[in-house]
Amino acid sequence: MKDLKTATESAFKIKDTTANPAPLGLMGFGMTTVLLNLHNAGYFELGGMILAMGIFYGGIAQIIAGIMEWKKNNTFGTTAFTSYGLFWLSLVALILMPGLGLGTATSKTALVAYFIMWGIFTGVLFIGTLRLNRALQFVFLSLTVLFFLLAIRDATGNAFIGTLAGYEGIICGASAIYAGLAQVLNEVYGKVVAPLGPVKR
């Protein structure tokens, strides 16, 4: 009877034909990160454009990608994309809420704690990427460095560290854009157009 049940379950195994949500999540993260860090590097002000990207592409799009990864039984993708989507929404909230009368402005000390927590979280996820491709390893390693640079900037008030964090963040975001678009192009062409690096098993 047990053998019959196993055979029946195998016969009705459903093939996953849903699309890969990772490029959406990587692009939402990457493009928003580049734009914010162009601001951190001193190229333009922190205005509505960055806040809108933080809400819609960095925030909502990554949360959607995380839910799609959940459907594909990918715990890492679900945790990463949903968390970073909510990171962007929380960052926008930290900026906008005081102006709406919802709490006081966040102190530098509180921001240091905020960025350190995200840095620790990202560092642990980086360990997970050691079983994935080189492109994702670079994204998560550079993001870990970025969070700690932002914490150091707010702890010291050092403008140079802030500018350095901006340029490092541009590199981090650009690497995520590459990782996302590489997956799209490789799938469309059915071959490796843009290498992502070997996957360690």
Image (spheres, rainbow, N blue to C red):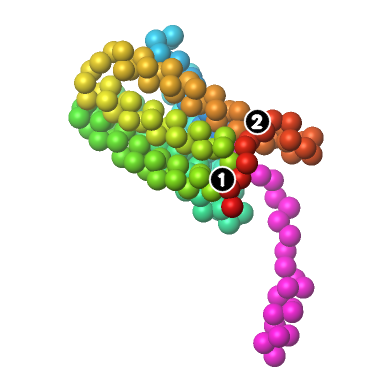
Estimate the x, y position of residue 128 in percent, counting from the top left: 48, 48
Task: Please name the residue that numbered disc 1 is placed on.
Answer: 132
Residue 164 in sight in this render: yes
Residue drawn at x 51%, y 53% is 75
Identify the image quadrant of residue 88: top left
Secondary structure, mark 2, is helix
Q: In this picture, which residue range is highlighted in magenta? A: 1-24
Residue 98 in sight in this render: no
Q: Nearer the viewer, residue 63 or 29?
A: 29
Q: In this view, does 127 lie to the left or right of 27?
A: left
Task: Please name the residue that numbered disc 2 is placed on.
Answer: 181
- Give neighbour class at mark 1: few <14, some 14-19, many 20+ (Cα, 10 Å): some
Estimate the x, y position of residue 152 in percent, counting from the top left: 27, 25
Residue drawn at x 45%, y 34% is 141
Q: Which of 66 and 41 is in front in this view?
A: 41
Q: Nearer the viewer, mark 1 or mark 2?
A: 1
The N terminus, quarter of image: bottom right
Q: Nearer the viewer, residue 171 or 31?
A: 171
Residue drawn at x 25%, y 16% is 158
Residue found at the very far right of the displayed protein: 189
Estimate the x, y position of residue 94 in percent, counting from the top left: 32, 30
